Each structure stands twice: as C-alpha cells, then as structure tokens.
Image: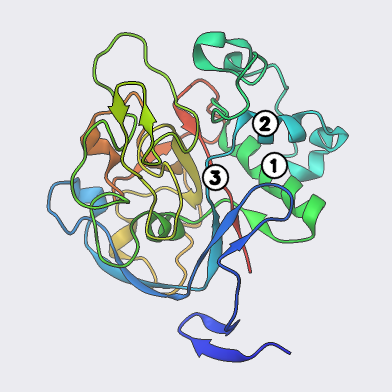
Amino acid sequence: MLSLFLLAGGLLAADAPKTVNDGYGDFLYVPAGAFKMGDNFGDGESRERPVHTVTLDAYYIGKFEVTNADWRKFRDDPAYNDTKLWPTGRVVPKDQSPYWTQPMNHGGGTPGSDNYPVLGVNWDAATAYCNWLTLKTGKKYRLPTEAEWEKAARGTDQRRFPWGNNIDPSYASFTRSAGFETAQVVGYYDGSKRGDLQTHNNASPYGAMDMAGNVMEWCQDWYSRTYYSVSPKKNPQGPEKGAYRVLRGGAFFFESQDLRSYARGAGWPSLQAWRMIGFRPAREP
C-alpha cells in the first residue's frame, strides 16, 4: 500500500514516479505547489504582468514536443476520424497542413523525419490528439494550462529561460537570419557536440526539453491579455471564453527575447497555416 502525504495541491502518493510512459512517450512529474508566474525581470510586455503567485496540483508534462512519429500513430489510426475526439466535432482533414509532405520542413510524410516536431497542428487537432491518448491509455491527457506550461518550463525560482537567465544559439533554435530556418529534431540541445556546435542542455528544472524555441506550443486556455490581474490563485484555467488560445515557448523563426519562459502569445484555434506551431501534452496523475 502506498504511503501518502499532503501537499498544497492535494493528497498524492509519496513515491509518485518521476517519469511515466504509457506507450506514447515519456512524461515528467511536476509536483504540486506554488510558484510566481509572470515577468519578474521587467523586460516583457504588459500582458505578462503582474507577477502573481499560483498554486497548482501535481501533473506530468511531455518530455518532448509531439514528433512526426507520434502524430503518425494518431493519423493512421481509424480513431482519427472519430468526431467525438475533436472539440468542435469537425475532423481536420489529414492533408490540410501542407508541411507534412515538405522535405525542407522535415514533414512527417518525408524520409528521416520521425524525430522532428510535427508542424502546423492547430489547437483543435492538438486537443484531439490528447483525447486520443486518453482513449488509448485510460489515463487523462490534455493540453497543459498556461500556468502548468510556465511552471514546467521555468520551475519555481523565476528564471528567464528553462536553463537559466542567459541565452545563445547553443541552447535553443531561434532566428539568426541565416537563410531558410526550420525546426530541429526534438532534444537536439542535450549537451552533445553537433557538427561545429557544442550544445548546452536546455532541459527545464523538471527535465522537459525544448521549452524555449523550436516550435511554439498550444496551451489549453483561452487567451486574454489582462487575465493575470484576475487570475485565481489555485489551478487557473484561463478565461471562460475568447477568440484565441494561448501559445507559449517561442519558435525557430522568433528573436531570442520571445523565447522567455514567461512570454505570452496566442493564435486562432483553427489556425493551420503556421509552420512554427506544435504542442506537448500534459497528463494527470
């Protein structure tokens, strides 16, 4: 019988595994507790303030962004066409995104693309994928809330980036005006020597990779630029309605400033046009 203890987020198993894998990739444990959310450096936008304390229940976050290989399992499953998995009841056609067949973007329909992040997935499709994981595993998968995403990215010490407070091209993919730019394989910045680049490990305090740069990531929440001033202190879920969903993390086509862990973005949920957008799911304990 598991011993139990009480955390700010509720009653949890004391020996909760740090990593779980239900057959669809590694998910990393983020313990319950409080952290300060928002722009504590004063180098951001008004939509990233005020800094406010948020308490979250425990959850798991994907170690990597969803890859082409991950997405292909969903795309090729007959359940892809199950309208119950799709938040609007409308199935996004498999050929709607042009990037799947583009070698220059390492699309999933091209050779050697398995470990690159899937590109151009809209919020509806990302949510459907999470619902599919729930169907397949019996565990609850979903997109992370904006607060969960930020805590998973920067931990509790209010660092600017997942690894610390400074950034250069050895940590993450961001624009350097070097001609055509696109995403790297997930986990590229793991401290290994890559050609003439000695990378730094860009893992977050909980071990999640590429939470700055590479591709922007969908969150569960509706977006409001003034939400922080009215956000509840416990498990905020975002506004009840809106026109846009939250995007986080910056992308390969962004300046380094936009990769800050507290930088906020947003996109129309049905947006399929951007090759800079991907996602990573969360899993409930």
Marks 2 and 1 sit apart, C-alpha to C-alpha, by 16 Å
What's the coloring here?
rainbow
Q: Is residue 52 above or below residue 242?
A: below
Residue 132 in the image: state x and y as whole percent.
75, 46
Q: Amino acid at mark 1?
A: Ala
Residue 213, picture quadrant: top left
Which tag is nearer the camera, tag 2 or tag 3?
A: 2
Determine crowd level at label 3: few under 14, some 14-19, many 20+ residues with C-alpha closer than 10 A: many
Q: Nearer the viewer, residue 141 or 107?
A: 107
Q: Secondary structure at mark 1?
A: helix
Q: Position of residue 21 (x, y in %)?
A: 68, 56
Residue tagged by mark 1?
A: 128
Q: Secondary structure at mark 3?
A: loop
Q: Position of residue 231 (x, y in %)?
A: 36, 66
Q: Which residue is mark 3?
A: 280
- Type of residue at label 2? Ala
Image vertical order of residue 127 relative to residue 228, above or below? above
Residue on which the image places disc 2: 69
Please indicate, yes or no, whether residue 87 appears anywhere in the rendered image. no
Q: Is residue 191 left or right of residue 38?
A: right
Q: What is the distance, in whole Å, between disc 1 and disc 3 at their CAs? A: 12 Å
Q: Earlier in the sequence, mark 2 or mark 3?
A: 2
Q: Which residue: 47% across, 49% down?
A: 222
Please identify the quarter of the rendering in which residue 12 is found: bottom right
Give, as a three-letter code, the residue at label 3.
Arg
